[in-house]
Image (cartoon, coloured by chain):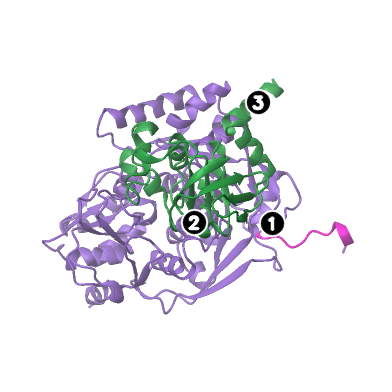
Chain colours: A purple, B green
Amino acid sequence: MTGAAAIRPQTLAQKIVARAAGRDSVSPGEIVICRVDLAMIHDSGGPRRVKPILERLGVPVWDPERVVVVSDHYVPAVDADSAAILKLTRDWVKDQAIRKFYDQQGICHVVLPERGNLTPGLFVVGGDSHSPTGGAFGCFMFGVGATDMAGVLATGETWLKMPETILIRWGGRLSDGVSAKDMMLHACTRLGMDGGDYQVVQYDGDGVRALSMTERMTLSNMAAELGAMTGLIAPDTVTAEYIAAAGGEAADIDRWQADPDADYRAVHEFDAASLAPQVAAPHSPANAGDVTSVADGKAIDQCYIGACTGAKLEDLHMAARVLKGRQIAANTRLMIAPASTRITAAAAADGTLAILTEAGAILLPSGCGACAGYGAGVLAEGERCMASTARNFQGRMGARSATVFLGSPYTVAATAVAGQIADPRPFLAEGKA
Amino acid sequence: MIGRVWKFGDGIDTDLLAPGAYMKGSVEELAKHCLESVEPKFAASVKPGDVVVAGRNFGIGSSREQAAQALKMLGVAAVVAESFGGIFYRNAFNLGLPALVCAQAGTIEAGQQIDIDPAAGRIVVRNDGRVLTCDAVPEHLMQIVALGGLVPYLEQRFRRAG
């Protein structure tokens, strides 16, 4: 030991922030300035908001190679206003010589890793609240508003108050028909939407290690619903294989791990093996219970599989397992907006899209769509919806009096077949017979 | 600053502050719909200098800074809450709107006049003279808000550098 010079054991979050701040270590509560490795913006909070600010400051983006732009909110354009937003985005990207521009290719949180932009240890700022999704790749990635982002784009740096880390450990393995979405609805309900207290949440345990990268992304994505700054998962071979396949920079798994004796604010233990499918009733993702306790026998007008949270390839596979050889109920409609164009292509190639459309699903363009009430598929007054999205705030998905229930893609598909909230497990059991 | 209180509960989210249906247009138009789902007369009745007081987790949800900008545009002088969504908290200061964390926010009542000193972290309820303590605001955020937001703050920084 070197006495006073010894560095206390560091969490994964501390290691990434310290590296970005150019320091050996950083302590919780310290305010530090970090160099930003990558900044991601989209058409809604991006160019249309940051362009006037950069013009007022009289500076271009600090490094076009470190900026990723994704048009995903107002896609495809439905009127002159949304078309103008998309055109402004394209023109600005060209003007700033930004090469990493994904125009209507899917939702930013899914497209960013899909195109190999993330690798463990990066300090990434995103102009969207679901930016914690990048935490699944061992990146310290968090969301900011447009003015904050303009500051990042102008200077290449930002500030933060070093958070503590809250460990969420899932023991056991999920049973069939239960998914990462159910884990998060349960965690939100147990811990509350401020359970994350703008600290870092880190997921670990056998139940997390057993998950694919896309399922891990759902855990990190919904760290936003816990009110956490980001939602980290330490990288392992699953992470490295995904990144290699996406053409990203090789993951340094050994470097980006917490020290064994690092301090955590709290450790929450959950059991994946005993978890049942969860459904969150209106108007909060923290308002969930077992599907059988929330099912009320009342008609559901719309089922929606979409958004960064719930329309990745694996999510479509879940829905297809329930829908194969079945038809959706006459009283409902099922809309599916795959999270990216690559996912649509993969789902077409492996036969998933055919299963979904033969069951009666309506395919929508890849984008944020109805989730935030921006795109096609919004709800009328008084309508009831079951969705695979992350948020069911009042008025978010259309009319003020519409109500949205949240569940996994399995549960949304089962609900579409039943025409009312339904447990997906009997459908999967029958499918196996 | 002295302001009249508008009181809200827990979990006032960004969809209530800046409804998605109006996000495509101007912030002026969006501001007319700020909080209309919970208080239909808010946007039309709020006066410059008024203060929004709320419970836990104010501004949770989206990163859309229009949630804070709408309040600012309507003349709201400050937001006092038991706690804030982390992104909203940053956005508010970036746009020149002080956000104060006050554990006793729940004891302030609608229509009361409160005297807020953000730098000192102190609120005086003028109706009954009670003094409430707020969490300290990081110094650089006070500098940002004093200049009117992050953009004027950066303008000053670039001027000095240039």
Residue at 77% across, 61% down? A8
**Residue matched to label 1:** A28
Disc number lying in front (1 or 2): 2
Q: Position of residue B125 (x, y in %)?
A: 57, 52
What is the quadrant of the N terminus of chain A in the image? bottom right
Find residue B156 and name its label.
3
Kind of residue at badge 3: Gln
Q: Residues within 10 Å of mark 3 (few under 14, many from 20)?
A: some
Kind of residue at badge 2: Asn
SS category of the residue bearing label 2: loop
Return the residue nearer the eye: A356 or A109.
Answer: A109
Residue at 31% across, 61% down? A317
> Can I make out residue B111 in this image?
yes
SS category of the residue bearing label 3: helix
Magenta: main secondary structure equals loop
Q: Chain of mark 2?
A: B
**Disc 3 versus disc 2: distance between alpha carbons?**
32 Å
Q: Position of residue B68 (x, y in %)?
A: 47, 41
Q: Are marks 1 and 3 on the same chain?
A: no
Q: Which residues are magenta?
A: A3-11
Vertical relation: A328 (above or below) B99: below
- Which badge, 3 or 2, comes first in the chain's sequence? 2
Vertical relation: A274 (above or below) A88: below
What is the quadrant of the C terminus of chain A in the image? bottom left
SS category of the residue bearing label 1: loop
**Disc 1 versus disc 3: distance between alpha carbons?**
30 Å
**Disc 1 versus disc 2: distance between alpha carbons?**
21 Å
Residue at 36% across, 59% down? A314
Q: Are marks 3 and 2 on the same chain?
A: yes
Q: Position of residue A2 (x, y in %)?
A: 88, 61
Find residue B57 and name its label.
2
Return the residue nearer the eye: A364 or B155.
Answer: B155
